[in-house]
Amino acid sequence: MPLISPLRNTLIFATCLLLPALSARADEKTEPPVPVRTVAPDVPSSFARSGSVGLVTISFQVDEKGSVQDPTIVKSSHAELEEPALTAIKKWRFKPAKKDGVAVSVHVTIPIKFNND
């Protein structure tokens, strides 16, 4: 099964939901963090064979250097997807958020969608 389509869909879904949520804070003269390196999660073979769709919501800090810190699961539709989602998000890198031109640490919550397209 080709992995390109599910990975692309996962990253598009996460990015589309991440950026609008963060830009809502623009009135505070804060620039949101921007993903510069994303890594799609590995889909467990048992889940891939099931034909199911899964969603894992992860909360974390993006520090002043753009690294992901302290990722935690907020909610998950399938427990077997939690570890792959956490492993992948730890590898993401961001252009850090800025407030008044200075890099700052910010809290981010994003959903990671697993599907079998």
Image: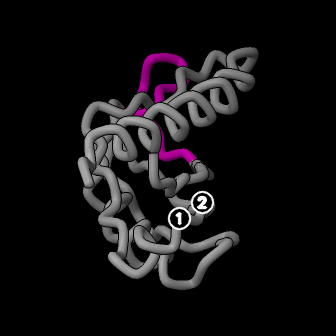
Residue type at mark 1: give it: Gly
Q: Position of residue 93 (x, y in %)?
A: 28, 44
Residue 14 on the magenta segment: no
Amino acid carrying mark 2 in the image: Val
Residue at left 33%, top 30%?
A: 95
Q: Nearer the viewer, residue 13 or 46?
A: 46
Nearest to the eye among marks 1 and 2: give it.
Answer: 1
Residue at the spot 53% in from the left edge and 27% down from the top edge: 32
Splitting the image into 4 quarters, where does residue 99 fall?
top right
Task: Check the image and report above or below for 24 versus 112.
Answer: above
Q: Which residue is mark 2?
A: 53
- The quadrant in which the N terminus is found is bottom left
Q: Circle 2 — which element? A: loop
Query: Looking at this view, is 27 or 93 the one in front?
Result: 93
Residue drawn where x is 32% and y is 51% of the image: 40
Circle 1 sits in a helix, a strand or a loop, which is it? loop
Q: How many marks?
A: 2
Say if 46 sits above or below 5 in the image: below
Can residue 65 be seen here? Answer: no
On screen, residue 99 above or below 84: above
* Colour setup of the view: one colour
Which x, y percent locates residue 116? Answer: 46, 54
Q: Residues within 10 Å of mark 2 (few under 14, many from 20)?
A: some
Inter-mark Cα distance, 1 to 2: 7 Å
Q: Is residue 110 at all visible to an observer of this figure? A: yes
What secondary structure is the stretch in magenta mostly built from?
Answer: strand
Q: Position of residue 57 (x, y in %)?
A: 62, 61
**Residue where numbered disc 1 is placed:** 51
Instruction: Please tell me the numbered disc located at residue 116.
Output: none
The quarter of the picture where residue 13 lies is top right
Q: Which residues are magenta?
A: 96-106
- Note whether 50 is above or below 35 in the view shown: below
